[in-house]
């Protein structure tokens, strides 16, 4: 069976939960390296390229092929589940990439104990072709054209260019 998808209008919503110790009530809290590190995690999540990847993957979702059992009839339920499963695979791949990017941030920044070296280069590479391949992103081939588009290449990245503690 081949299912052609003609209209898919996804609504993407992102949430990011930050847990901080109760002791973060000091007036100097904004000078704390750990807090800034947590905001770097938010920057990883809010990177517009993650959303662009998912949108692009969903737009490319046009034909779904599946073999039916001999007595199986394609129903609304089966067709809906097929579409949901394909959407879920793509969403989970992007979420996993974001998780891996956050783990990399923790590694290079020692969980906030030190500044991220060459911040601009670090954040720039997170959604590059090379990094997607290094992280085994399963849909690299489907996003190659997106990676070359100006909207992706020139996306404004939401991170501080310089750590305020660095001189």
Image (cartoon, helix red, strand yellow):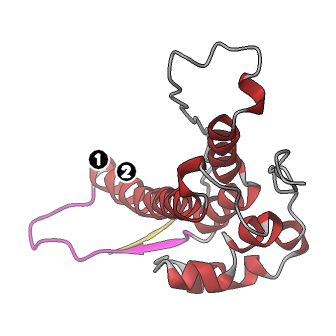
Spot occupied by residue 25 in the image (x, y as percentages of width and height):
64, 13
The residue beneath circle 2 is 80
Spot occupied by residue 14 in the image (x, y as percentages of width and height):
60, 39
Is 122 left, or right, of 45 in this rendering? Answer: right
Quadrant containing the N terminus is: bottom left
- Up-down: is 128 above or below 24? below
Q: Which residues are magenta?
A: 61-74
- Is the Cβ of the residue at disc 2 closer than 8 Å to that at disc 1? yes
| Residue 100, numbered label | none
- Up-down: is 55 above or below 147? above
Is 127 left, or right, of 162 in this rendering? Answer: left
Give the structural element (helix, strand or loop) at label 1: helix
Categorize mark 1 by other alpha carbons within 10 Å: few (<14), some (14-19), many (20+).
Answer: few
Residue positioned 77% across, 32% down in the render: 31
Dominant secondary-structure state across the stretch colored magenta: loop
- Up-down: is 68 above or below 92? below
Residue positioned 66% across, 69% down in the render: 126
Spot occupied by residue 148 in the image (x, y as percentages of width and height):
81, 82
| Residue 77, numbered label | 1
Give the structural element (helix, strand or loop) at label 2: helix
Between the C-alphas of marks 2 and 1, the distance is: 5 Å
Spot occupied by residue 127 in the image (x, y as percentages of width and height):
67, 71
């Amino acid at each position: 069976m081949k299912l052609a998808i003609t209209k898919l209008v996804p609504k993407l919503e992102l949430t990011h939960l930050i847990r901080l110790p109760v002791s973060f009530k000091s007036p100097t809290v904004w000078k704390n390296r750990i807090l800034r590190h947590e905001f770097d995690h938010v920057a990883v999540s809010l990177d517009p390229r993650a959303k662009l990847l998912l949108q692009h993957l969903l737009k490319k979702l046009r034909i779904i092929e599946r073999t039916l059992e001999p007595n199986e009839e394609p129903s609304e339920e089966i067709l809906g589940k097929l579409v949901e499963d394909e959407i879920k695979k793509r969403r989970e791949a992007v979420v996993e990439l974001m998780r891996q990017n956050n783990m990399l941030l923790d590694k290079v920044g020692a969980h906030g104990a030190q500044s991220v070296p060459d911040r601009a280069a670090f954040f720039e590479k997170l959604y590059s072709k090379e990094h997607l391949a290094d992280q085994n992103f399963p849909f690299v081939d489907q996003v190659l054209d997106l990676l070359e588009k100006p909207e992706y290449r020139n996306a404004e990245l939401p991170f501080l260019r310089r750590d305020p503690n660095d001189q």
